[in-house]
Image (cartoon, grey):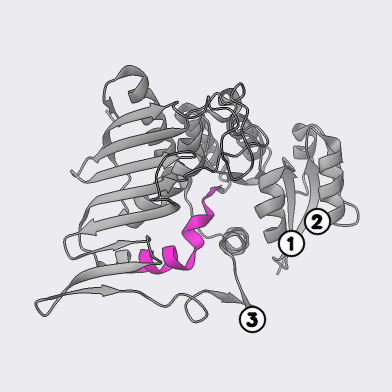
Amino acid sequence: MRKVRVGIIGCGGIANAKHMPSLKKVKNVEMVAFCDIVRERAEKAAKEYGTEDAKVYEDYKELLKDESIGVVHVCTPNREHGFMTVDALESGKHVMCEKPMAKTAKEARKMLEAAKRTGKKLTIGYQNRCTPEAQYLHKACERGDLGEIYFAKAHALRRRAVPTWGVFLNEEEQGGGPLIDIGTHALDLTLWMMDNYKPKYVVGNVYHKLGDKKDAANAWGPWDPEKFTVEDSAFGFITMEDGATIVLESSWALNTLDVGEARTSLCGTEGGADMQDGLRINGEEFGKLFTKKPALDADGVDFYDGETESPSDHEARQWINSIVNDTEPLVKPEQALVVTEILEAIYESSKTGKPIYLNK
């Protein structure tokens, strides 16, 4: 297989935790360029993941001038997703942009337009589609096992797990808190399972209730209330054009024991499913109710070259294969745009106290 030369823009947490380790496992990938405003981060990444002659940049536009690079991964704060992705597409690169697609729907639309204009591939990093549970459930939904899915919940709740590093708490850089950070994963999963991307209107409530607490209990240590400029919880009620309902719940800090993220619950005319205790599918057969729990451990996960794949590894391999084989990536930009439009509508509805109508 031909070598795919990749450039990384943004060498911080998500690049090191997901993108670069997974790309390194794809045999026909060469990471040849690394860019970060903190040069030391780019140098460290180049040394650990790059080719011997990998180049290091502080200005992403200089990286984009390298015509030998075919693919760029944008792993920067949300504020930079839009313009960096557009620039990369227009420089002739295929782009994997970390989620969410963009800080605003307007920016996300520009990304989609640039992909169509240039003919380059664009995908968004929703790796939770690649879990064994999600892959199995999606096949069941495609086959029609649940019938018409008319009610769903998108779950993204943490009791106390506020990220205290980087710019997660900075509204200007990120555009929001848990809704745009983890709520986006749960919503993407839910829409994908339903294969429904036509929202009619959205009602939302956003809360700043716990962010001002000092010395708060937290998985990564107390947060600084002065820097906590985003919401700590957000909830949305989404009505689709066909009448289906989605409830989205997201929080980094909520006084609840009912926690879990990147999960969906689905209710259809023929059956239902949830991810509350592994994957559970429920239905009715021969006049009796049943609950099915597929075995998704050693025998149920995807294997690749004899090793169990993580969702991130699966995502990276599928993405590179879509480029090499000229097929569609797992996450289409049109789908990710709808996720961003709904998230933005939840924020706007909370500000105005009114429902926000989409696709008018």
Name the spot of residue 151 as percent of width and height, x first: 23, 50
Report the residue at 22% width, 40% height from top. 241
Kindly state the secondary structure of the residue where label 1 is placed.
helix
Neighbours of disc 3 within 10 Å: few (<14), some (14-19), many (20+): few
The segment highlighted magenta reads 123-139
Which comes sooner in the sequence, label 3 or label 1? Answer: 1
Query: Is residue 130 magenta-colored?
Result: yes
Callout 2 amino acid: Tyr
Nearer to us in this view, 354 or 220:
220
Question: As displayed, is residue 116 above or below residue 302?
Answer: above
Report the residue at 48% width, 52% height from top. 331
Q: Main secondary structure of the magenta part?
A: helix
Quadrant in which the N terminus is drawn? bottom right
Which comes sooner in the sequence, label 2 or label 1? Answer: 1
Kindly state the secondary structure of the residue where label 3 is placed.
loop
Which comes sooner in the sequence, label 3 or label 2? Answer: 2
Name the spot of residue 206 as percent of width and height, x first: 39, 28
Name the spot of residue 19 as percent of width and height, x first: 67, 53
* Residue that carries the numbered disc 1 in the rendered image: 24
* Residue that carries the numbered disc 3 in the rendered image: 306
Callout 3 amino acid: Gly
The alpha-carbon separation of the residues under discs 3 and 2 comes to: 23 Å
Report the residue at 80% width, 47% height from top. 33
